[in-house]
Amino acid sequence: MTDPALTLNEFTAALGSFEAEAGPAVAAATEADALEAVRAKYLGRAHGWLKDLSAKLGQLPKADRAAAGAAFNEVRLRVEATLDARRVALAPVRDAGALADPTMPARETWPGGVHPVTQVIDEMIEIFRELGFTVALGPEAESPWYNFGSLNFPADHPAMDLHDTLYLSDDLVLRTHTSPVQVRTLQAYPPPIRVLIPGNVHRRDPFDASHAPTFAQVEGLVVDEGISFADLKATLTHFANRFFGATKTRFRPSYFPFTEPSAEMDVLCGVCRGSGCGVCKQSGWIEILGSGLVHPAVLESAGVDSEKYTGWAFGMGPARTALARHGIPDIRLLYDSDVRFLGQFAK
Ligand code: PHE
């Protein structure tokens, strides 16, 4: 037995009366329970009016079904929207007491803010991006070869001691700097290359006013033909002036196994402007990064021809830089997650 077929006109009329009845019924409901009964009657999945209509769709001639289905969906969405709006209108007013007493204090809101260390990293990326640098990342759990060997550390270098480095196993360490990503990046992307490498690093250091056992670093690496120390100096000086506002920098000779020659860069203390204060330990200068020309042995570790290419690199601690920028006397303040302190720098 099949039902007698329905015509499109009959279906459209049924749809029209459905909407004509459902709309006023929704409006007439004055509380949530009554509204729920209206919903069940008209839109209920089990035996609502809508369900009957959708069964009728199947009785239409095949050629009419697509148009009828579209009309059906439009009406359904309209009735659902009316019902939802009514539900919101009937919802009990939250916190009616507060409305009754307009002298109650406003609810406190807690907007988030970018951490001062993250702000330094973001700004660095922005400044170097303008100079054509992109961003590269590497793993925090690193092989001793990438962390030390590939970077020209001699086999008995003291940094590799258990005292200084956290070993996860014989062949896995928590990277002590972002420099291993220099080699990883050069292996993946042949020169010319200009990258910035932000990331966390770990050392077996005590947590004191100027050291944290886990801290962020930002590494920079440039490798191309004809790169010299003048490029290093010009770029890092440009960065310091952009970042701190016109300032003074100085380069002091230093030593790293993976750069030759090596230099540390100081900027004029932003707190005392050079006259000496507690933040710069009376020196007038704050050291913000280590740098140097990439050692040929490092280029060779990465499979780069050190006769053809030269490069420079730097490593900077954004937490130290945040201290220098804001005149904060103790690095632990940055890691305590005390919003009363951090909120002062929120952007
Ligand atoms: N990796 C060095 C450190 O952690 C910093 C550095 C990076 C120095 C690149 C020179 C070149 O102290």
Image (cartoon, rainbow, N blue to C red):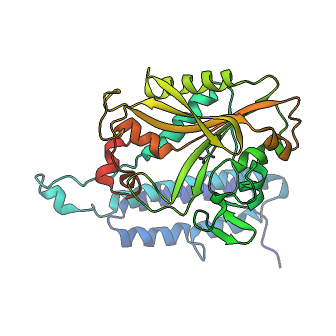
Residue at (35% x, 57% y) in the render: 89
Q: Position of residue 139 (x, y in %)?
A: 70, 57
Along the viewing direction, whichever of 30 and 290 lies nearer the viewer: 290
Residue at (53% x, 41% y) in the render: 121
Location of residue 124 with respect to 198 vertically, above or below: above
Count every numbered label the image shows and give the total: 0
Q: Is residue 27 left or right of residue 160?
A: left
Indicate which quadrant contains ligand 1.
top right
Along the viewing direction, whichever of 110 and 82 lies nearer the viewer: 110
Along the viewing direction, whichever of 100 and 46 lies nearer the viewer: 100
Q: Quadrant of residue 43?
A: bottom right
Q: Position of residue 68 (x, y in %)?
A: 72, 53
Q: Is residue 99 left or right of residue 108?
A: left
Farthest-out residue, front = 156
Q: Position of residue 342 (x, y in %)?
A: 35, 49
Along the viewing direction, whichever of 29 and 239 lies nearer the viewer: 239
Location of the N terminus (image quadrant): bottom right
Q: Quadrant of residue 289?
A: top right
Residue at (44% x, 73% y) in the render: 37
Location of the C terminus (image quadrant): top left
Q: Position of residue 220 (x, y in %)?
A: 65, 37
Q: Quadrant of residue 92?
A: bottom left
Location of residue 322 with respect to 64 vertically, above or below: above
Q: Is residue 250 left or right of residue 170?
A: left
Location of residue 46 with respect to 161 vertically, above or below: below
Residue at (31% x, 28% y) in the render: 275
